[in-house]
Amino acid sequence: AEYFTPEELIGRKALVLVNLAPRELKGIVSQGMILMAEDASGKLLLLGPNGTTNNGAIVGSCEERIGSSFVFARFTLLW
């Protein structure tokens, strides 16, 4: 891997977008995407829970703000 070795990812939790249409990337069929962010220096960081959570926990994504309230879409954390 260009940014993380498999050993660096063992035991870590990350947000993964799944059920995408299969696409071949670098000779491997992919059906998902690990969500990451880039810091100011260009370093990639895994996005994941900020604390203890179970696999399959519901994760929210803010879709819109109405006054002082937020409307969330729901999706599931699989790993």
Image: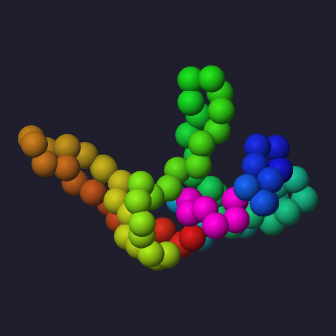
Provide residue 40's location: percent of width, then percent of height.
Answer: 56, 23
Magenta-drawn stretch, dominant element (helix, strand or loop): loop
Q: Within the image, what quadrant is residue 23 found in?
A: bottom right
Horizontal and vertical percent position of residue 8: 73, 55
Instruction: Say which of 32 and 22 sits in front.
Output: 32
Q: Is residue 5 left or right of residue 64?
A: right
The magenta segment is: 9-14
Toward the top, the furthest residue is 41
Q: In this rendering, does residue 21 appear at all?
A: no
Residue closer to the observer: 46 or 19: 46
Residue at the (10%, 42%) spot, across then down: 68
Question: Which color scheme is applied?
Answer: rainbow
Tell me: residue 53, above or below residue 43.
below
The residue drawn where x is 59% and y is 34% is 38
Residue ID at (65%, 27%): 42
- The tally of labels here is 0
As drawn, is 36 to the left or to the right of 59? right
Can residue 44 be seen here? The reply is: yes
Q: Is residue 58 left or right of residue 12?
A: left
Asked where in the image residue 72 lies, by quadrant, the reply is bottom left
Residue 11 highlighted magenta (yes or no) = yes
Residue 34, placed above or below residue 76: above
Query: Residue 53: x percent and y percent?
Result: 42, 69
- In the rendered image, which quarter contains the C terminus? bottom right
Residue for point 64% across, 57% down: 33
Horizontal and vertical percent position of residue 71? 22, 54
| Image position of 63 with respect to 55: above or below | above
